[in-house]
Amino acid sequence: MKKLLFAVTCFVFFQGNIRAQSLEDPKGEIRLNFLNTIVLGSVELGYEKFLKPDQSLGLEVHLNDRFGYRTQGNGSNFSATSFLASYNFYFAGNNDGKVYISPYFKYRIGEFTEVVNNANVVTSLNSAYIGLIAGYRWNFNNFAFGPFGAIGRGLSQSVADRFSIIELKAGFNVGYRF
């Protein structure tokens, strides 16, 4: 995982050799949820394809995903990966920064293992979520960054029996537009 994070960081910072396009008409963006990488150790990488100046399609992969902000405790272990697809609408701003809102669909695969009465109990985290992301994105040269918050509803009763059916997340994305 460290090699993947290093490769993404190198790609973003060494883009000087590639001819940059104007931010007025970006074609795509790669990004990393910087906050959750530090706080949770969850690597959330995303790609956004701009369809119009105010609309885009986003795809993300969340490695070492957690359910909300639950951490691994004594004898507990999250082993999950999520895939998220969103349609992003930008409004209320200018080329330097805009508010956005994004309905999304997320699918998590993996499991949560915990020790209960000296026995391992495994909860399958395979489940789908629908939800909404809202945030703000600042643009500086070809870099984009900003905070966001998300709320989603799980569609799996077995996950809802162990965790909440509502998942809240937040973060701070750092990205590169090209």
Image (cartoon, rainbow, N blue to C red):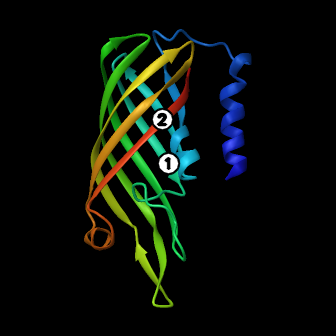
Mark 1: which amino acid?
A: Val
Image height of 120 relative to 4, above or below: below
User: Quick one: 134 or 74, which is closer to the camera?
Assistant: 74
Task: State which quarter of the image contains the C terminus.
Answer: top right
Please report the residue visible at 33 percent of the width from the left and 13 percent of the height from the top: 93
Give the percent coordinates (x, y) of residue 105. 32, 48
Image height of 76 relative to 52, above or below: below
Indicate which label's residue lies in the foreground, 2 or 1. 2
Give the percent coordinates (x, y) of residue 145. 50, 26
Badge 1 crowding class, 10 Å Cα cut-off, few under 14, some 14 to 19, many 20 or more, is: some
Mark 2: which amino acid?
A: Phe
With 46 as the anchor, is 14 left or right in this view?
right
With 27 as the anchor, is 98 left or right in this view?
left
| First along the sequence among labels 2 and 1 | 1
With 102 as the anchor, is 73 left or right in this view?
right
Q: Is residue 45 visible?
A: no
Give the percent coordinates (x, y) of residue 27. 49, 20
Q: Which residue is mark 1?
A: 61
Q: Is residue 161 visible?
A: yes
Please report the residue visible at 35 percent of the width from the left and 30 percent of the height from the top: 135
User: Quick one: 140 or 54, which is closer to the camera?
Assistant: 140
Q: Which residue is mark 2?
A: 172
Badge 2 crowding class, 10 Å Cα cut-off, few under 14, some 14 to 19, many 20 or more, is: many
Give the percent coordinates (x, y) of residue 5. 66, 44
- Provide the secondary structure element on which disc 2 rests: strand
Q: How many marks?
A: 2
User: Do labels 2 and 1 touch, CB within 8 Å?
Assistant: no
Please report the residue visible at 50 percent of the width from the left and 12 percent of the height from the top: 23
